[in-house]
Image (cartoon, rainbow, N blue to C red):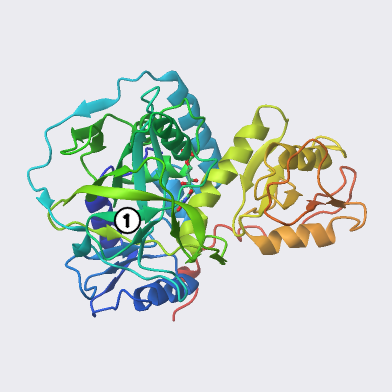
Amino acid sequence: MASICSSDMHEYIASLLARGEMQVVEKEVDPKYELAAVVSQSQKQSDKAILFKNVKGSQFPVIANIYGSFSRMAEMVGAKEEGLNEKWLSIFKGFSQTNNDYINIVPEPDDLQSGKLSELPSITWREEDAAPYITAGVFLANNPDAGTPNLSFSRCMMLNDDSKMFCCIDAPHDLAKYQSAAEANNESLEVAILIGAPPPVFLAAVASLPIKQDELQLAAQIAGGLLDMYACEHIDLLVPAASEIVIEATIRANERVEDGPFGEFLGYYCDVNKGAYVLDIKNVRWRKDAYYHGLLCGSREDLTALAVSWGNRIYRDLVDDFPGILDVTINPTLFGSIIKIDKQSEQHPRDVIDAVFRLNPLYNRMCIVVDKDIDIHDLESVWWSYLTRGNIDTRTHLFSDLPDVENTNYEFSGYLGIDATMSLDAKLKRSSTPGEHEINLDDYFST
Ligand SMILES: Cc1cc2nc3c(=O)[nH]c(=O)nc-3n(C[C@H](O)[C@H](O)[C@H](O)COP(=O)(O)O)c2cc1C
């Protein structure tokens, strides 16, 4: 199956509209709470993307929930849901074999328009958020030492000031390391913030690669071709030509400010972050009829994007070292991984559970291992296998903190491992009806 990942958000939105995968809101919505409330409520009913055509106070249509569907994420890389991990793995393998020659430098688009930060939608997402925030801005920066491009996310707190914003970059992230390297020389760090980034660029930004690896190159690998890039006007960076909106900025050296509170991905407000950075805005430009991507943190879109990336990291960590690893998901809760195996021995599930917690302690608080016939994307099926295939006591493993593994799960301790497989000599035979999977109900029901 070829990738249908469009390298252009405009094209991708047109295709979502054409196939009825996008809900359109014509009526005016208030960017303070109302837009977020619609996103939140809509995600409870459907995983369709949303296009807000009329957002009060701004000329920009706002798109949301673009990445809020596992099947769309799989389709973007040319896979089906159950083949998503394998496909990602092949992209990673292919990617490490390619050379650096993946950029096509092009003139800047003819339709670029300059404007001000205050012309962008000012969206307040949650009741106690300190201000409106840009939540889906992909940060592109080059390593000040090695030059390697990095893609990541950092929420930007809008200050009612066209010249600056505050942003939050967690210390372990590569961008924070780039910033420290620049600061060591008392220099600011140049960043381009892409809103409505081309889908392959967004996907590469969600993935986390070792600091020496080039995440733009990963984007090119996902796109399956060269990345058209043009030079920024005020900073020394190339940016993907298909980006809807580009903010050129620098992060001030040796200055920290406060951002937040803000409703984060875990569904709670963070405390005020005293280590936020100051972004000096150098330039704001957008394509004609640009879409502004707004992402409700903690919602399906946020969690699905992270689940694809983190789940695949677990899959990559396991698949070469363990026999019989078939698939991994961390949907629907980021804190629990579900691993499908072709069971090799009675010890096999337990070994997999141990490895998952050792290799990926971050955010991983529960691991369930299931047999190969179980649909890991269907929690009902996962729990059914746990409760009907064997002992509860001997298949449930509670750990305190793991020796030699740093507990990175915030302030909480403990891990839960569940072996939901059946014993290799179990006589359980799953019932089925011939033809049930091939039936087309439209051939039977008249209304
Ligand atoms: C929608 C979204 C928003 C995010 N917002 C932030 C943020 O505000 N600050 C942060 O430090 N990380 C944030 N992250 C996490 C990282 O940017 C992301 O996991 C990235 O892969 C880390 O990049 P790195 O591997 O280059 O270090 C966000 C991730 C997503 C998917």
Q: Residue at 71% x, 56% y: name it.
A: 411
At which x and y percent is residue 158? 32, 62
Query: In the visual, does 138 lie left or right of 369?
Result: left
Which quarter of the image is occupied by the N terminus? top left
Is residue 164 shown above or below 230? below
Is residue 155 or residue 379 the one in the foreground? 155
Pick the front one: 372 or 146: 146
Instruction: Say if residue 128 shows up in the picture.
Output: yes
Query: Which residue appears at 29% of the width and 78% of the height?
Result: 30
**Does the rendering let one see residue 77?**
no
Residue type marked 1: Met
Q: Residue 188 versus residue 137: which sits nearer the camera?
A: 188
Q: Quadrant of the C terminus?
A: bottom left
Q: Secondary structure at mark 1?
A: strand
Residue 70, horizontal then vertical, whole percent: 49, 54
Q: Is residue 243 left or right of residue 332?
A: left
Relative depth, front residue between 300 and 175: 175
Above-or-below relation of 229 to 40: above
Q: Is mark 1 within 8 Å of ligand 1?
A: no
Mark 1: few/some/many CA within 10 Å (<14, 14-19, 20+): many
Spot occupied by residue 400 in the image (x, y as percentages of width and height): 84, 50
Residue on which disc 1 sits: 165
Please tell me which residue is depicted at 79% across the width and 40% down the height of the picture. Answer: 354
